[in-house]
Image: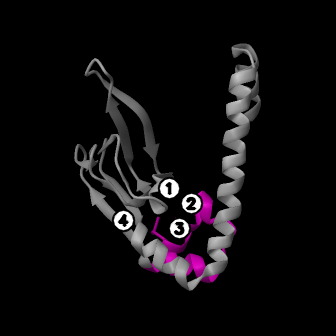
Amino acid sequence: MTHDPIQCVEQVSIFKGAPQNVIEALAKVSVHQLKIPAGQMIYSQGEPNDRLMIVDSGRVRVYSYANDDRERTLYMLRSREVDLTGALFTNHEHHNFAQAVEPTEICYLKQNAFKEVLKNYPEMALSLVDILGKRLASLEQRDISDTLLTSKERLYNYLLDL
């Protein structure tokens, strides 16, 4: 299967519904299909978190260390999954580690390139405000539900969401 930079960018949830010219501009400034051998670190704790990452193929393990120094896998990323969306909006460091589990190809969009595209397409900025506002409202509702519901009710709601 050949890689399509446009489809790669379109799969990022915050870009869904963006105008085609914006998607094309984002695809042009993204890095596509960076090859990562199995076992290689993609990022480490303390490094700058300045890019959104898309796993084009392969698998990536994101992990951290607990207070007792035991390594804990937080989640696995597989083909077509996106990580680090927040890195497009704020400057901070990685809190975790990411390592290729098998030969992996990743695509990424750096924060500075993303912000340059936003300067040229203000309609995208307004679209992102709407999308992020909906996510914030959803998180606030989830926080309220977690506080007010019993564990049984939270599990029921989680299963309904699935």
Callout 3–callout 2 Cβ contact below 8 Å:
yes
Q: Which class describes the residues within 10 Å of circle 1: few (<14), some (14-19), or many (20+)?
A: some
Callout 2–callout 4 Cβ contact below 8 Å:
no
Q: Which class describes the residues within 10 Å of circle 3: few (<14), some (14-19), or many (20+)?
A: many
Q: Secondary structure at mark 3?
A: helix
Residue wearing tag 4: 33
Residue wearing tag 1: 85
Q: Position of residue 144 (x, y in %)?
A: 72, 31
Residue wearing tag 3: 9
Mark sitting earlier along the chain (2/1) = 2
Horizontal arrangement in the rendering, residue 130 relative to residue 46 (left or right):
right
Horizontal arrangement in the rendering, residue 52 relative to residue 136 (left or right):
left
Q: Amino acid at mark 4?
A: Gln
Q: Which mark is residue 36?
A: none
Residue in the picture at 39% in, 69% down: 32
Q: Secondary structure at mark 4?
A: strand
Q: Position of residue 116 (x, y in %)?
A: 46, 79
Q: How many marks?
A: 4
Residue wearing tag 2: 12
